[in-house]
Amino acid sequence: MGKALMESALGAQWQTLPPALQAHYQARDNRDEGVLSIEFPAPMHPILWLLRGLGALLHRRGCELDATVEKRMDVDGRQHWCRRVRMEDGHEMIFRSQWVLLADNRLIEFVNRFLGLQMRVEVIDGQLHYHGEHFILQLGKHRLRLPEALLGHTSIVETALDDTRFTMDFRLTHPLFGQIYRYHGLFHTRA
C-alpha cells in the first residue's frame, strides 16, 4: 500500500496530524459515518441549484443529517470521494469528487471532468486547514485558473475530538456578501 494522498500533500506535517485525521485520510479504502448540517441564505438557492447541476455542493439545507463519506485510491494516484447525505424527507443526495495531488502542499478537488478547486493544506495546532486558492477549468491538458472572487473564498478546518472522531467545517465566503455557504459535521472513520 502506498502513501495516502494527504500524507504526500502534507509531507513532514503528516506526523503532527492527530490519529483520527490520519485514519480519515488513510491510503486504503475507508468510510466515514456521521452527521452533517448545511446552511446558506435563501438568495443562494438558484445559484446552488446550477452548481449542483455541475456536480458541486448540495443545494438543500438540513441540520444534523445522516451522512457517509466513502474514499478509495485509484491506480493513477487520484482519490475518489463519494458523499451520501440523507435529507430529512428521506431523499439521499450524492456528491462525488476526485482529488489530484499537486506540489507544495496543494491539491485539486474536481467535481466533474472540467471543474475543480485548488487548495493548499497545512496543519496548524493539530487542525488540518484547507485554503482555497482558485477554481480550475480543465480543458484537455490545459488548466485555466479562475479567481475565487467569482464564487467566493473557500476554507475547511478539520479538528480531531479524540482518537476516532473529528469535526469538519467548510465555508464559502464572498468578498461582498460574506458567508454564502457552510456545511459542517461530526464523523468517525471505519476502515
Image (tube, grey):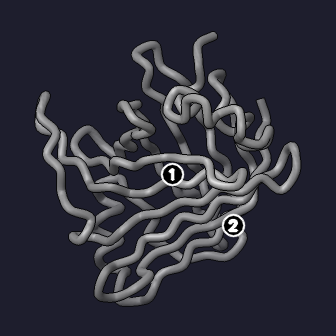
Q: Position of residue 13 (x, y in %)?
A: 62, 36
Q: Position of residue 148 (x, y in %)?
A: 27, 65
Q: Position of residue 133 (x, y in %)?
A: 32, 55
Badge 2 marks a residue whose secondary structure is: strand
Residue 65 badge: 2
Q: CA distance from mark 2 to mark 1?
A: 13 Å
Q: Quadrant of residue 91?
A: bottom right
Residue drawn where x is 56% and y is 68% of the image: 183
Residue 72 badge: none
Q: Nearer the viewer, residue 59 or 19?
A: 19
Q: Quadrant of residue 16?
A: top right
On screen, residue 43 above or below 115: below
What amino acid does circle 1 point to? Answer: Ile
Q: Quadrant of residue 190?
A: top right
Nearer the N terminus, badge 2 or badge 1? 2
- What residue did someone put label 1 on? 94
Mark 2 crowd level (few <14, some 14–19, many ≥20, 10 Å Cα): some
Q: Position of residue 66 (x, y in %)?
A: 71, 60
Residue drawn where x is 61% and y is 75% of the image: 62
On screen, residue 30 above or below 128: above
Q: Nearer the viewer, residue 31 or 117?
A: 117
Relative to 18, is 90 on the left or the right?
A: left
